[in-house]
Each structure stands twice: as C-alpha cells, then as structure tokens.
Amino acid sequence: MTGLVVAMDGPSGSGKSSASRGVARALGLRYLDTGAMYRAITWWMLQQRVDLGDAEAIAARAADPVLLIGTDPDAPAVAVDGVDVAEPIRGSEVTGAVSAVSAVPQVRARLVAEQRAIIGAGDIVVEGRDIGTVVAPDARVKLYLTASAEARAQRRTAELAGTTVEAQQAAMARRDTLDSTRKAAPLAKAPDAVELDTTALNLDEVIAEILRLVKERT
Ligand code: DC
C-alpha cells in the first residue's frame, strides 16, 4: 500500500467528502480536502475586502495568506494566518464566492504546488475537482463520483439549515457551470478515472466499492 494516492474528483454533493474520509480511515491513509484550501483562500479574500469581480486583484494577493491544512480524516483542520476557519469556510458567503477565486490561475498555481508537497510520497486520499487530471495525474487509483442533480441537492440540503432542495439545486448548478467551464483546470473526469454514480448507493456501499477498486489496483 506504500505510496498509494487515491484521487477523488467530482461535483459537490456527489458524496466525495464522506467517501474520501471513510476510505482514508479504513485504509489508515491521510486525507486532503483541496476544496477546503480554495475555500480558506476565499474566506481570506473576503476578509481583506479584495474585489472578487476583479481577477487581477485576486491574483495580486494570491500569495499573501498563510495557509495550514491538516490531513487527519477524523479531524480535518484548516487555518489561515493562524485563524481556525473550519466553520466559516462552509458558510454561504464563502460558498457563493469560491468559484470566482478558484478560477484565478495564480491561486491555482499556488495551491497545486502546496497540494503536491503535502501528497509527497503518498499514502493519502485526495479530493477535489482536478486531482486526477492536474494535481496527481500518476495517482494509482482515480475515481470520478457523480450523482443525479436531485440526489446531490437533497444531500446538501440535509447538511445545511434553512434551505430548500430547489434552492440548493439552483446554487449547485451555478457552481458546477462555473467550475466546469473555467479556463484553468476545470472540473473534468480523467480519461483513466473510474466513474461511480452514487445516486442509488448509501455511503457504506460507496466506500465498499472504492475499497474493492483499491484492492484490485494494489
Ligand atoms: O469541494 P468543495 O465544494 O469544498 O470545493 C469548493 C470550490 O473549490 C469548488 O466550487 C471549486 C473549487 N475547487 C477547485 O477548483 N479545485 C479543487 N481541486 C477543489 C475545489
């Protein structure tokens, strides 16, 4: 198992985060949530009142925030300039702004370099949008998780208070379009990734299927 990298890509609500953490726990691997890194930088840009409609303004500040991200699947920690941001990065303000920040090539270049440094020698499950295509194209196991738009919206609604399935479905469709049509490293399935539709599967079934695939490849 030494050196194993499991790349988990897919849109939000596809079940990536829970499945990635479950697989990491089951195999005693580290876990990296790259979406949390883009969210943390976005939180910082909002704090600094950077104009998020101005890609050059974002690029000019991309190197400034000091980011710390943990790799424990049981306690995924994330801090910016020494502030624990694990909670605020899940809020609607950051969620609504993160696609604009993550589309900026300077932000991506910085974070991809940090992600590769963390991945290092491997033994890690990495989730995101461009892991199998850009960050870790040599990963031994690549998954691309999908689910129907309705199932994804239902899962996200169950996690959040004060929202409806319809509102979530509209917000997710907007974010998916932005994430898949941007120029820099858009959300995409790597040609050699295994696509797993999680619509009709529960979490244990998704994890079991991924563990089966890992066993087959190792
Ligand atoms: O997985 P998430 O919803 O926490 O990701 C938040 C945003 O970050 C997502 O809308 C797109 C961006 N992202 C990205 O561009 N590349 C990644 N590897 C991970 C996330």
Image: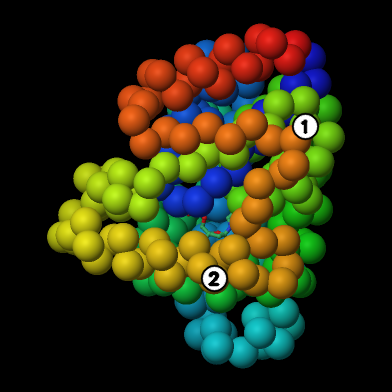
Q: Quadrant of residue 41?
A: bottom right
- What is the x, y in percent for residue 119? 75, 36
Assign a secondary structure to mark 1: loop
Q: Is residue 71 visible to us here?
A: no
In the image, 31: left or right of 5?
A: left
Q: Give the residue drawn at x 36%, y 52%.
A: 149
N-term-proximal mark, 1 vs 2: 1
- What is the x, y in percent for residue 76? 50, 38
Q: Is residue 185 visible to us here?
A: yes
Q: Quadrant of the C terminus?
A: top right
Return the residue nearer the eye: 91 or 12: 12
Residue of label 2: 178
In the image, 129: left or right of 20?
A: right
Return the residue nearer the eye: 62 or 167: 167
Q: Quadrant of the N terminus?
A: top right
- What is the x, y in percent for residue 42? 54, 69
Residue of label 1: 139
In the image, 110: left or right of 196?
A: right
- At label 2, the amino acid type is Leu
- What is the x, y in percent for residue 117? 80, 43
Ligand number 1: quarter of image: bottom right
Disc 1 and disc 2 in contact, CB within 8 angstroms: no
Question: Is the residue marked 2 within 8 Å of ligand 1, measured from its CB?
Answer: yes
Q: Give the residue drawn at x 58%, y 12%.
A: 212
